[in-house]
Amino acid sequence: MNTVILVVFVLSWFTFVFSKKQSYWYIFLLELALWISTSYLAINVLISGNEYVSELISNFYFHPLIIKIDKLSAFFILIINFTSLSSFIYAKQYLAPYLKEKSAFNFALHYFNFFMLNFAMLFVVMLSDGIAFLLAWELMSLSSFLLVIFESNKPDIIKTGIKYLVQMHVGYLFLVAGFVIVYAVTGDFGFEGIKHLVEKTPLIVGLPTNFWIFIVFFIGFGIKAGFFPLHSWLPHAHPAAPSHVSGLMSGIMIKMGIYGIIRILFNLPELNLSIGIFILLISIFTGVFGVMSAIVQHDLKKLLAFHSIENIGIIGIGIGLGVLGEVYHQPVIAVLGWAGALLHILNHSLFKSLLFYAAGSVYIKTHTRNLNKLGGLIKKMPFTAFAFLIGAIAISGIPPFNGFISEFIIYNGFFDGIKQGGLAFPMLMMFGILALALIGGLAMFCFTKAFGVVFLGTARSKEAEHAVEVAPSIRFAEILPIFWIIIIGVLPVYFFNFINSILQERFPLFEFKQLAISNSLKWIGIIGAILWLSIWLFYVIRKLILKRKKVIYADTWGCGYTAANPVTNQYNASSFAANFKRIANPVFVDLSSEITYEDKEVFPVKKSYKTHVEDKVEFKFIMPIANNILHYVKKIAVLQTGKIQDYILYPLLFIIIMIVLTVLNII
Amino acid sequence: MLYVYFLIAVLFSGSIFLLKNKKWMHFLVYGFNLMQLIFAIYLYRHLGTFEIAYFKYDSISVLFAFILAILSFVAAVHYQIYEYNQQQSIRTVQIHNAVYIGFNVALMGVYLSSQYGLLWAFVEATTLTGATLIYHDRKKIVLEAVWKYVFACSVSITLAFVGILLLSVAVQKVGLSDLSFDLLKSNALQMDPIWLKSAFLFILVGFSVKMGIIPMFNVDIDAKDVAPFPISALFSSVLLNAGFLAVYRFYQMFQITSIKPWMNHVLLIAGVLTLLFAAAYLLKVKNYKRMYAYSSMEHAGLVIIALTLGKVGILAAFLHLTFHAIVKSGLFFQVGQIMRLNNRVKINITGYFYQNPFGGLLLLFGSLAILGLPPSGLFISELLIFKELLLQQNWILVVLILIALTVIFYILLKDVFKLLFYPATQKFETDLKGTVVENSLQLMLVVLSIYFGIFQNHYLFDLIQASI
Amino acid sequence: MNALFILLFAVSIFYFSISVNVKTYIRLLGFQGVLLFLIALNGLHELSYIHLIFIALETLVFKGILIPAYLLNISKKNKVTNIKNFKARRKMKGFYLILTTTLVFVSTIFLGNLLKNDFLDVKIFSTAITAVLMGLIFIVINKNITIHIISFIIIENGVFLLALAIGNEMPMMVNTAILLDLFVSVLVLGVFFNKLTYHFHNDSTDILSKLKD
């Protein structure tokens, strides 16, 4: 298997010799080899329960390069491979419209980087040595950056991509710092070192050292994952990328940040209360912030991107619950928290990639992502609408789909927690339940808006009116996640057990069979199956009834107003969220224009109104810092005068300053 | 063998003046380069031996000699194409090629000499030959740059000489008169720190122009800006190495003495300032050649900082210099192609990837490598430097360095992607795309840098490790 | 006897900071060359002919006659720098310059006494360091390339003095290489200076500041 991995890596560099269409199939072949070989290893590990440890390169910068797959890695490998598979199938037809304008090198670069991203993500979860891990980590950022800028002739997209890569680079520096701190304490540069950190560490600013080490790692990984307030790249990069890349990035790449956090937490010798509370609180913030920002968006992909932030919040809440459960020695709560988080990682990778694929289908057929220019697409693109609907229901956490299952597990953990004694712990649990409920409700509100405005009603533009259904291969790519979304919804207990088998490593003494939730999950599955069956039954009955009758298609109902223009008088994205926007004002910066009438204006002239919101964190926090740094750095450049006598002055000054510093004993 | 090397250099260099055909002149340079490569291999097989009393083949000089031999050949090939496209006069090519050989010999001398005075003399020789090489296109702006370069170099090299004189005061007190490295090193502990400190200060300042670091980097940037691009490539790679070696020799000799912390502080200050200045000037940069020149300055600063970080730091510094030399020279060769296609290298040139896809691809990979992104070797060396730097726990410096590096990262990324991918606004000549020879040589450099990023080459490692 | 020559050399540096006339500068350079020869001659312990010829070549012929003559010559030929009324336009007033020179001189004497040891002639050492620093300062405060070259040669003279103060003998080969380099560097400077004045018709550095971002 190792040879296969090395060979495909070397072969991938030859992508550039192929033509536009050949390069797709070439990379497909390599990807296939990669998927099969790594999935084989992962499945082996999951079945046998033994770690897979193997030396890939004997001499890689002071250490042999060792790949190590435990159950957690195996779980991630499977998700990575599956999402890459659907994404790559989707890419073929999605990129077809670009065949004319882009050169063969453009395509080769894109496919090559797709392969590299997949490859790097696999290695991120397989490596534990610090240097190799960081290499894979940076390779992942770089290749995803090059994927994002596929439409590279648009300056805006390049700027977005660069902002993304710079933020990733900052995150990378934090990771280096984290590993170095661990190295300084334990002498081991890598994840293994974290295991050897001392249990009872001295306090820094009233908190244990382990907490601060965790914070450094959390910033590094959190930038990738998109935790509040480190998320600001995410809402820009996802819309800029081609949809299959958005699906891949949102579906699995941001989870690499989560993977890192889980890995750190699993390796830390002792979890502190402070870590648990920190994760729980920041995740709640992230979730609520994400969904609130999503509601006011009118760019479809940006809306989905904010939902990724929300879901990272939900995953984080699960992790927080798991950590708190461990800290309070409540294994049931801990298992429920971890299991919910892991299952939600899987679930989110499915429905978020599906949603992005559907949004991409809408984009390639209508050439717009602006909600206020879409509408009525369910008649033109029924399958896409169906796919989006499934994704929307699943992401809102409604049964019988998978999103409900993972959230249900987390809810269960919280309710279990309330039953425990004490004051602080139940309070935290209550807070978690409230936040989760708020997030779920708002998510539902948001997807009602998104689905309603895009697919229902009347078309708001010519492009939307003339849209047609997408190609079969795209539909096939969308069916892949749909299949699992439904399966998880109907057979949740098997997946719960599967996740538990991963957690077995973490809780070796815990009896997973005693969990009461298994029974509820069984019933949820049965009821879900009945629901599906009855839906199918109703559909058949309806078909039978309508068989002999004539069906008349008419315009969407105008609420009884016969004179109203259905295009302009229907609810649009802005008006749907207008009431909410007033409440949610604190989370964003409103840059909408206002319509004012002057006193003298008897007959008002034509006016336009524009709604636009910006992310508050980015607008008020990150941009000022970045601008200030650039401003002050630029000030140094006044010393460049172009005159030779000044250039002689600098060494003179340097010598004098150094002498003065030496004499004063400063250096 | 060294005699043979010098003799052949003089012979070839002289006979270029007798020729009337450009082609034969280039052949002579290639012949010299071939001989230089053989010489480098000879050096490798005779590690640690002395020749003509003042030349020693230690491992680091052999490593640098190899880099010189390879890059010099690649640059010579590119010069032939450059000169052909510009239709330069025979006279210009004659002078250039003859001096080019001299420049090579001077650099080789800097690498091999084992005596500080001799090293100084060869560094001075690189100035004189280098200035002639820069003065290739007879334009006013070039003349300005050459004047600045020659003048500032003369001043700085004189300061370095002051440093050497101060060093010899310290040496005399121990009862020595020779300035050979081995002798100095073995007697380092007895020497007066005050004289060593002042000597180091002047030597650092004096050689700073060769390395392109604070305080005399300005003229170096100007020189790289106006020089023919193969020469800029050599200035950014092998000459930078020579400057570094000149400083490193001093550092290596006296790192066992009590002045080591002080030297580290001075180097750190110089390095951090270099990074900050590189970041600041990059914010204003207006042409791609200068941009890459500032990038070299950044890397020189980083290497200077790495030097202060102990053994791993020095290992990282030499790795970094090796990889940087490979990648950066490749980038300058590619910039030459941009120049050929567009007749300028101003920052408003865009869409290079559409003009010249293969060249664009090379430029893309090269630039990503120079930014320290994987899978290039620079990633590893930068990571090692960061690691050692953070271990020092000097947080103010760390923050300053990382801010400067992030700003540089951002600006380079922005400008390179603008050059590559923004819609092209200017006309260009497609029939001047890179030839097979050029492309394959540049490809070789890029592949080398990626190879080193993934596989740890034991020849390279043994050479570096032996010198620390 | 030696002390007198050194004193004269120090005085010549002061003279530089008083005068603004370039012709005077060039004459002073010649004067310094002769002084260097005399100081070196005094410092020689054993009189070997090779050394004598070497030193005479370097100081008397090269620094004392050739360079001043060459500078005068190119200044005349170019007509850029009309030698008769060519005055240095300094950024610093004469009074402050003398003050600076005094300050530098005093501090180098102080420094020399601080670092005093058997192998160091403090008088020569202080004068030499003063010459180097003042040469740098002259470059910094002047805008004319001609004066830059003159200041550079003052620095070179200072370095020569420093070498005398230290009195360390480098191996012959190294010495020759160093000397050769110095010759060629001044020559190259002269060549490019010639080209510069030919192309720009001016020797002010203001016109030489195009190269920047």
Image (cartoon, helix red, strand yellow):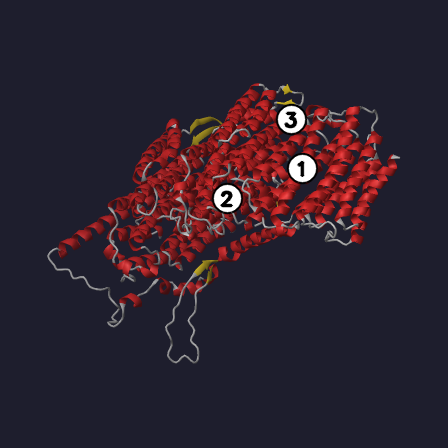
Q: According to the image, label 3 marks what residue? A: B113
Residue at the spot of label 1 = C187
Q: Nearer the viewer, mark 1 or mark 3?
A: 1
The residue that label 2 is drawn on is A169
- Please name the amino acid that badge 3 sits on: Ser
- Mark 1 packing: few (<14 Cα in 10 Å), some, or many (20+)? some
- Specify the subunit that label 1 lies on: C
Q: Position of residue B141 (x, y in %)?
A: 57, 47
Question: Which residue occupies the extreme left position in the image?
Answer: A548
Tag 2's secondary structure?
helix
Task: Residue A574 in the image: state x and y as whole percent.
Answer: 37, 63
Q: Are marks 1 and 3 on the same chain?
A: no
For badge 1, the amino acid type reads Leu
Report whether mark 3 lies on the same chain as mark 2: no
Where on the picture, by quarter, is residue C129?
top right
Q: Residues within 10 Å of mark 3 (few under 14, many from 20)?
A: many
Please, what secondary structure does the residue beneath circle 1 have? helix
